[in-house]
Image: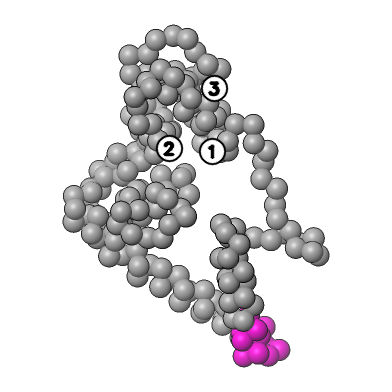
Amino acid sequence: MASTRKYPTIKALVLEFVHRCAGRVDYDALAREVRKHFPSSRWQRSHWAYYRCQIRRGRFRTQFSQAERAALSHTRWRRAGAAAPVPRSRDDGSVLRGPRARDAETKRIGDALLSHVRLVISLAAGDDPDKRFKLNRWVFSRLLQDEIRVKRPIKRLLWDRGVRSCHACGKAFASLKGVEIHRKDESQGYSADNCVLVCRDCHQETA
């Protein structure tokens, strides 16, 4: 897949690379090509997110066929040669959903908290499945609101600093409505230094 031709710009390389693989882009292979031809470039995944969005829906859309755009839409950012993720399962064989803990300590404490909350909800609901559902949903929604309260002032701070366009695709924002916040380092929490503003489409692609 590697090319020996000369490229005047990174844009030219990226667009030709997408054509070359008919939209089925391996991100790691693309990154190697960029760094090979432009060794001083500060290429990041957010740059690819911009090109991907512009090819699918933006300024480069007309340069690609419907088949190429469709293939690009279904391309996942899995590392080259990596196997497809295997669904996690419980001891009874049922699929285990939800986020993975990034470290053993988080998992240990989180599992203990979750076990306690489940026990309290079970005791409170008794044999009433509707009450159990309502209590589960209430706790979930409250925790979600707690996180939203943390994000909102960070989003406003970035906006006030002059961040008025999507970090990934460059689309300008008319207002904060529909703007989402994305952590640059997913192992760290929400802070102004660790967050960027992105549009909803790009956030769904990079999540």
- Please tell me how crowded label 3 is: few (under 14), some (14-19), or many (20+) other residues with Cα within 10 Å: some
User: Callout 2: 10 Å neighbours few (<14), some, many (20+)?
Assistant: few
6 over 165 or under it: above or below: above
Q: Are marks 1 and 3 in contact (CB under 8 Å)?
A: no
Q: Is residue 117 above or below residue 146?
A: below
Element marked by disc 1:
loop
Tag 2, which secondary structure?
helix
Residue that mark 3 sits on: 22
Name the mark nearer the viewer: 2 or 3.
2
- Considering only order in the chain, which callout, 1 or 2, is on the residue closer to the N terminus? 2
Is the residue under label 1 in contact with that under label 2 (CB below 8 Å)? yes
Q: Residue furthest front?
A: 105
Q: Is residue 55 left or right of residue 71?
A: left
First in sequence: mark 1 vs mark 3: 3
In this view of the protein, can residue 132 be seen by the observer?
A: no
* Residue linked to disc 2: 45
Measured from the top left, where is residue 74 in percent x and y? 56, 37
Q: Characterize the magenta stretch by its predominant secondary structure.
A: helix
**Viewer-closest of 40 and 13:** 40
> In this orientation, does residue 90 appear?
yes
Q: Which residue is mark 1?
A: 77
Q: Position of residue 45 (x, y in %)?
A: 43, 37
Question: Distance of mark 2 from mark 1, alpha carbons?
Answer: 10 Å
- Which residues are the magenta region? 118-130
Q: Secondary structure at mark 3?
A: loop
Which residue does the image show at 58% across and 38% down from the upper left? 78
Compute the Cα span from label 1 to label 3.
16 Å
- For image coordinates 46% across by 28% down, the residue present is 31
**Considering only order in the chain, which callout, 3 or 2, is on the residue closer to the N terminus?**
3
Check residue 98 for magenta coloring. no
